[in-house]
Image: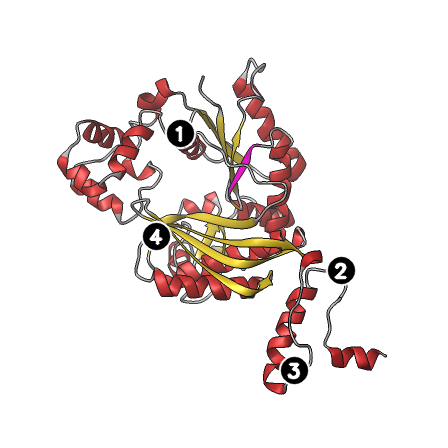
Amino acid sequence: MSKVIVHIDLNAFFVRAEEIKDPSLEGKAVAVGREGRAGIVSTCSYEARKYGVHSGMPVFQAKQLCPQLILLPGDYRFYRTLSHMFRRFVRNYTEIVEIASIDECYADFTDVLKDVKDVEAFFRKLQLDLFKQTQLKCSIGVAPTKFLAKMGSDYQKPMGLTIIRKKDIKKKLYPLSIDKLYGVGKKTLPRLQALGIKTIGDLANRVDTDDKEVMNQFGKFAYTIKDWLHGKGSDSVQAESDDPKSLGHSTTLKHDTDDFNEIKLVYEELCKEVSYEVKREKMMGYTVNINIKEANFISHNKSITLDRPISDAKLIYKYAINLYEKNFLGISVRLVGVTLQNLISNKDVAVQMNLFVGEEDEDKTKVLINDINRGFDKPIVMRASEVKKEK
């Protein structure tokens, strides 16, 4: 029996969060991003997209396309709060939830839907209930695999609901342009078009016949594509543990990129999310791990284990970006992620350091003590000299 896998994607999440704070923004061309020549659009409203503005676009270019664009710097603390509300909402239905990024998740609804006669009505109500409780809008894909569920949530936006069964693949997916296939980025797209592949159906027919040109283009990944388009992809949703040994976030980029400045901005936000989660759980971690997925879906991981645990976003970012710079510069990536591993409770943190330090170590000591104390309601660690002053 096939599972029922659901992918829920919050529509233009950052912009929608800004609209919740300021309803006057609704219906306007709005983008979240940074000013300046190096600024990148994180996301934009559907009104802005009508002018050709899209995620990952340089801000100066977006303003050229849409002079009336309203650019906002982003309130990431508020975004994380809404993201937690979203996750709690989904977990009211099922505990089998896999967080894909701050604005999307996979969930296994197999058991939830056993006695549900009208699946479409069930998910329409879920959409409306989410909106009533959080004011967030979402698109939902329902399918037997994670790939098909992801394709379903992308099929109609905003507030779309698409159910894709195996028998629906040819009818619903094959006519779509090839750029709509999950995983096809801006560098892969022209190569496929050069091979005469214009639709997902074109690609499916070529991989089914083991076309040499396509096999050379994708290598072994061509067989994965063949499985996906025959409804044979993964249906395993990785639920988070109640007592996590690691906490991480990753995001699939809107396009393949090797632009280090763009990637640094993404990692900066991911590290803030990880830090927020870790501190919320009152934990710290010894190991910073980063993962990337190339445009051809090959995955890589690199990590560094520290001699003391951390939870501060700036420190996580420092080690994460150093790992990236040493190992992955120049690689065109589709997904990036960061995880803080080997977590321990703040209560179990044993600080093995000499609190009587010389001047050369004073700054390092302050950083360490401040980092530890951030995880508690009030400062509990201080230097011995400060203890003497208190006495």
Q: Which residue is mark 3?
A: 357
Disc 4 is placed on an element classified as strand
**Of tags 4 and 2, which is closer to the observer?**
2
Give how far apart the Cα atoms at labels 1 and 2 are.
44 Å
- Is 347 placed above or below 94 here? below
Give how far apart the Cα atoms at labels 3 and 2 are.
26 Å
Position of the C terminus by quadrant: bottom right
| Residue 359: numbered disc | none
Label 1 vs 2, first from the N-terminus:
1
Q: What residue is rendered at 30% in x and 61% in y?
A: 330
Residues 54 and 220: in front is 220
At label 4, which amino acid type do we have? Val
Circle 3: is it few (<14), some (14-19), or many (20+) Cα within 10 Å? Answer: some
Magenta residue span: 96-100
- Is 145 placed above or below 389 here? above
Q: Position of residue 47 (x, y in %)?
A: 46, 44
At label 2, which amino acid type do we have? Asp
Q: Is residue 83 magenta?
A: no
Q: Which residue is mark 1?
A: 148
Residue 181 in view: yes
At label 3, which amino acid type do we have? Val
Give how far apart the Cα atoms at labels 1 and 4 are.
22 Å
Residues 201 and 69: in front is 201
Label 3 vs 4, first from the N-terminus:
4
| Residue 333: numbered disc | 4
Query: Given contact means CB atoms under 8 Å apart, are the residues at marks 1 and 2 in contact?
Result: no
Q: Residue furthest bottom?
A: 359
Label 4 vs 2, first from the N-terminus:
4
**Of tags 3 and 4, which is closer to the observer?**
3
